Image: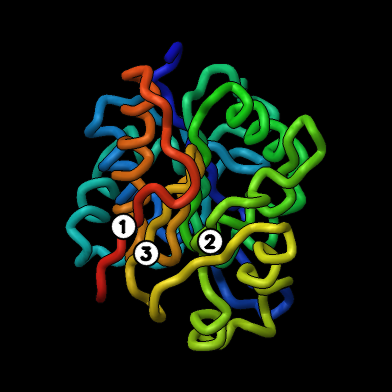
Amino acid sequence: MKSKKVLFVATNCNRLGDTGLRTGAFLSELTHPYQEIQSAGYEIDIASPLGGEIPLDGVKMDDPINAVWMNDEDFLEKVAGSLSAEEVRPENYCAIFFAGGHGAMFDLPQNKKLQEITSEIWENDGVVAAVCHGAAGLVNVKTSQGTYLIKDHEIAAFSNSEEEAVGMENVVPFLLQDKIQSRGATYTHASKFAAHVVKSGRLVTGQNPASAMGVGQSVVEVLEFIEDGREVPAVNWCEWHVSP
């Protein structure tokens, strides 16, 4: 593998549609994978559709991992001054990870540049990953053959029942579970708000914030397969699933 760099992508959106309610990237969906992947020796860059400041949601400082990274100067600089999609050179990265938060539903799916970056990393035999609403960044990505990248893969993401439980089913522009299924992927989930991560070849996805650490761990595991020159097993080779 030529690179030991991973690209994190998060939303620039700080408002939930026309509701006036604040949103952003859900903090633990950045910090928990960040800790797992950086601890494994990978350098991490953070990008967003427009670059600059990434608005944060779910800033819970009683979460010890959040507390560590919200006091880390380098991490805070990356969040305050993220790379724009136009600045990213995909050949520099061995993996791309999309963080969630409801804001991701409003600006990640339509960003053509991020779609191109994701497709190129994938076709360079890299890892593509997302947690929760971060999977919105994957639903419109196509390969060079013109097929949806997630087609025929097993995908975990925020479920319809979870969206209804938080009262957002009529606020988000689409239901993520439905969109994933419409792209020819198999949607997989645990019970509401339980941790659930699926590795489908080089595609790693998690259902909700409780799954963020498992996504980070799983990205590292897949990258280790690739670094060792081992063939990554195909669809549904391992599932990380813990009850709340």
Q: Choose the circle earlier in sequence order: 3 or 1.
A: 3
Label 3 crowd (10 A; few <14 / some 14-19 / many >=20): many
Distance, label 3 to label 1, CA atoms, is 6 Å
Q: Nearer the viewer, residue 167 or 96?
A: 96
Q: Residue at x 67, y 33 (%)?
A: 119
Residue named by callout 3: 196
Residue 71's x, y, as percent?
A: 24, 46
For the residue marked with disc 1, what is the amino acid?
Trp
Residue named by callout 1: 240
Give me the disc on residue 44. Answer: none
207 left or right, relative to 103: left
Q: Can residue 81 be seen at all in this image of the molecule?
A: no
Residue 176's x, y, as percent?
A: 63, 68
Q: Nearer the viewer, residue 185 or 162?
A: 185
85 left or right, relative to 31: right
> In the figure, residue 182 lies in which quadrant?
bottom right
Q: Residue at x 63, y 26 (%)?
A: 123
